[in-house]
Amino acid sequence: MSEQDAPPISIFYRRDGLDPGPALGEAQREDPVRRVRDFWLHRTGEYWLVTRHADVRRVLADQETFAMYDAQRAPILPNELLNMDPPEHTRLRRVLTPEFTGKRIRALEPMIRARTGELIDAMEARGPAADLMADFALPLPLGVICALLGVPDPDQGEFHRWSRTTLDLGLPMEERLAAGRESHAYTAALVAEKRRSPDDGMIGMLVREHGDAVSDAELVGVCELLLLAGHVTVSNTIGLAVLALLARPEQAARLREADEADPVIDGAVEELLRYLSVSSTALARTARYDTEIGGVPIKAGDQVVCQLPVANRDPELGAGTDRLDIGRKPLSHLAFGHGPHHCLGAPLARAELRIALPALLRRLPGLALACPAEEVSYRVNNEVYGLHALPVTW
């Protein structure tokens, strides 16, 4: 597809390399709650674009005022945790939360470390050059989440293909929906199998511990969400993080030299999540009644879209928020959303980043880009921002 044929990019998804698009920065400075006519999920309409950190936090926290459900979006969005309002959301979230406690995540860390080591071993054996996205950033979180849910290794490639297609805003909606239907059919069959014969994976544990309290349809929705969000966001964060660190060798060195107990690692993970913010928006909310955001009147039925990357660069958070500084005191960021719909898998994502990034830098101390930085291809016009490929050498 030529640049002339490429579909326009909604203001909600605009990026400039590692930064939010300039129009988003201008909106935050001049008109932080702005009425725009644009498209979201390929539906053109009127939306409120919210860009200040405090306003985004308020919208995401207030599900009494701002509902997830919208009749016009319902045929497109699957009926899963991310799209639910109380009381269904509250009930299902309460069931799932114990699966992501610190204790459960710590029990997964040996597997994450082992997979990280195996992938770096394979890169070294084939090296000294690789596509970091295909050889490390993608297979690590995909393998972890598939192991967690009991998806057989041979089927992992299909899940990646479905995810990639579903999230690509440049593709026709019917093609994206078709990929979603294929993913749904596979996941429904997987859940049915685990219902008949529960194993030690997450689905089997939910079946054994909660039985009929969680329906098959809800389990399917949970699995689809975890498989999609559980690998696409982390893989793209890894790729962008490596790109950002290679451009800042003193920060890469600091992370490389830190031992596992050094708090700089946790701080670096939080700063990279804030700075990169691969999820461009939270799902649109619908105002239940007349209200206001930042002093701007909002009418009942209005659609509100919160733009996360620019909110995470808000100067109100402190000085230098437009710069990456892994040594700064962690700032309150919105990379995982906020409020009742805060990302359930955030502890797992943090663990993967905390293990993968230092290990990669330590094992491959000569890691460098294998092409000029301006030739790196970004995954633009996508619900999850990232890179198509990251050629590296060492």
Image (cartoon, grey):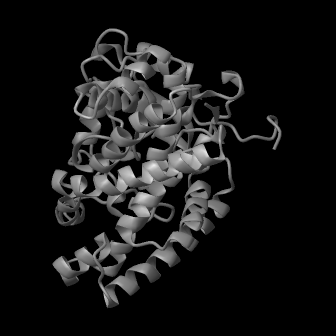
379 relative to 89, above or below:
above
Question: From the viewer's perspective, is 303 left or right of 14?
Answer: left
345 relative to 375, above or below:
below
Task: Residue at 32% x, 88% y: name it.
Answer: 197
Circle count: 0
Would residue 49 be visible to someone looking at this image?
no
Q: Position of residue 302 (x, y in %)?
A: 39, 42
Q: Position of residue 65 (x, y in %)?
A: 24, 44
Viewer-side residue, 127 vs 82: 127
234 relative to 223, above or below:
above
Viewer-side residue, 89 vs 302: 89
Q: Where is the N terminus found, in terms of image quarters?
A: top right
Q: Position of residue 131 (x, y in %)?
A: 64, 42
Would residue 263 be visible to someone looking at this image?
yes
135 relative to 85, above or below:
above
Q: Where is the C terminus found, in terms of image quarters?
A: top right
Task: Residue at 34% x, 53% y: name it.
Answer: 68
Task: Residue at 17% x, 77% y: name it.
Answer: 209
Viewer-side residue, 204 vs 68: 204
Question: From the viewer's perspective, is 113 left or right of 242?
Answer: left
Name which quarter of the figure residue 392 lies in: top right
Viewer-side residue, 78 vs 166: 166
Q: Position of residue 262 (x, y in %)?
A: 24, 28
Task: Residue at 33% x, 73% y: name it.
Answer: 219
The furthest residue to the front: 125
The furthest residue to the top: 319
